[in-house]
Image (cartoon, rainbow, N blue to C red):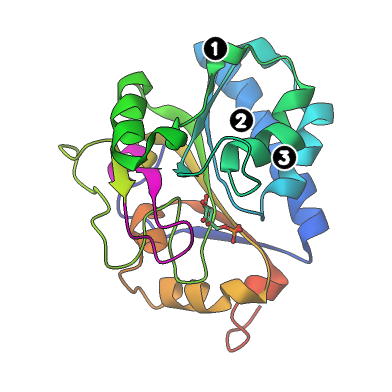
Amino acid sequence: MLEENSLPRWHIYPDQEQISTHLAAAITRMAAEAIALRGAFHLVVAGGNTPRATYARLPSMGRDWQRWHIYHGDERCLPPEDPERNSLMLAQTWLSQVPIPGAQIHTIPAEAGASEAARRYAAILPAQRFDLVLLGLGEDGHTASLFPGHDWGQEKSSSPTLSILDAAKAPPQRVSLSAWRLRHTHALFFLACGSGKQDAIASWLRGENIPAAVVGRGADVWLDKAAWPESLPK
Ligand SMILES: O=C1O[C@H](COP(=O)(O)O)[C@@H](O)[C@H](O)[C@H]1O
C-alpha cells in the first residue's frame, strides 16, 4: 500500500534495456497478483517516449489479458492519429498486439478539447483504487500533465481529472488525472531514463515542491544510471 509520508524507493539499472525488461516483469507480476486477489488489473499508463521499450515487452510477457483495464494518466489534445498522442504510442507498441477487450481500454477523448475531455473522462474512472499507476518524469519535474506552477489537484475533493490549457511543453492543451487520483492506487511506479532527467531527479531528492515529488511520495522510482544526478553517489 502507498505510504503517505514515506520516501520513494530508488531502483537504479545500468541502462534502458535492463530497466525495460525488469519493469515489464514487475508489471506482469503485479497484474497476476491483482487478478488472483481481486479478479482484475486496473492499470494507469504513462505517456511520452520513455516507456515505449517497456510496453513493447509486455505482449510476450503478460497473460489473462481479458482481466486488464487500461487508463491513461494524461493525454495531449491532438487528433487521435497524431503521432504525439499517448494513446497512439500505446496502441502501436503494445495494445494492438494483445486481446484486451476494447471496452476495457479507456482512452482520454482529448480530441474533444481539454475541458470536455476531462469532464467525460472523470465520468468513466472507477471509484476504487487503481492496482498500479505508472508515471513518467518530465525534465522540469512534471508528471502525467501536472506541471510546475499549476494546480495539481492534491485534495480528495479536487476533480479527478484536470484540463490544462497552457502546459509548458507542447501541446499546451492536455488532460491529466489529478495528483490525488493518481495516488489513489495500491502501487505507484515512476520511470525515468537518460541524462535529461538528472535535474528533475536532483530537485526531487532535495525535497523541492515539484509535481513528481508530490505525487511520488512512497513510490518506486525506476531509473537508469544516466538519469541519476552526476554529483551524487550511484
Ligand atoms: O508530456 C509528457 O511527458 C512525460 C515525460 O515524457 P518522456 O517522453 O520524457 O518520457 C510523460 O510521462 C507524460 O505522460 C507525457 O504526456
Q: Quarter of the image holding residue 182?
A: top left
Q: Is residue 167 above or below residue 107?
A: below
Q: Residue 116, position in %: x, y?
A: 30, 32
Give the residue drawn at x 57%, y 77%.
198
Mark identifier at residue 103: 1
Q: Are marks 3 and 2 in contact (CB under 8 Å)?
A: no
Q: Quarter of the image holding residue 195?
A: bottom right
Give the residue drawn at x 69%, y 32%.
91
Cα gap from disc 1 to disc 2, whole angstroms: 22 Å
Q: In this view, does 104 lie above or below 144?
A: above
Callout 3, which amino acid? Tyr
Q: Earlier in the sequence, mark 3 or mark 2?
A: 2
Mark 1 nearby-residue class (10 Å; few <14, some 14–19, many ≥20): few
Callout 1, which amino acid? Ala
Q: Name the residue under label 3.
A: 55
Q: Residue 67, position in %: x, y?
A: 61, 13
Q: Residue 8, position in %: x, y?
A: 46, 58
Mark identifier at residue 30: 2
Q: Give the range drawn in magenta.
A: 165-181
Q: Indicate the quadrant of ligand 1 in the picture.
A: bottom right
Tag nearer the camera, 3 or 1? 1
- Say what secondary structure mark 3 lies in: helix
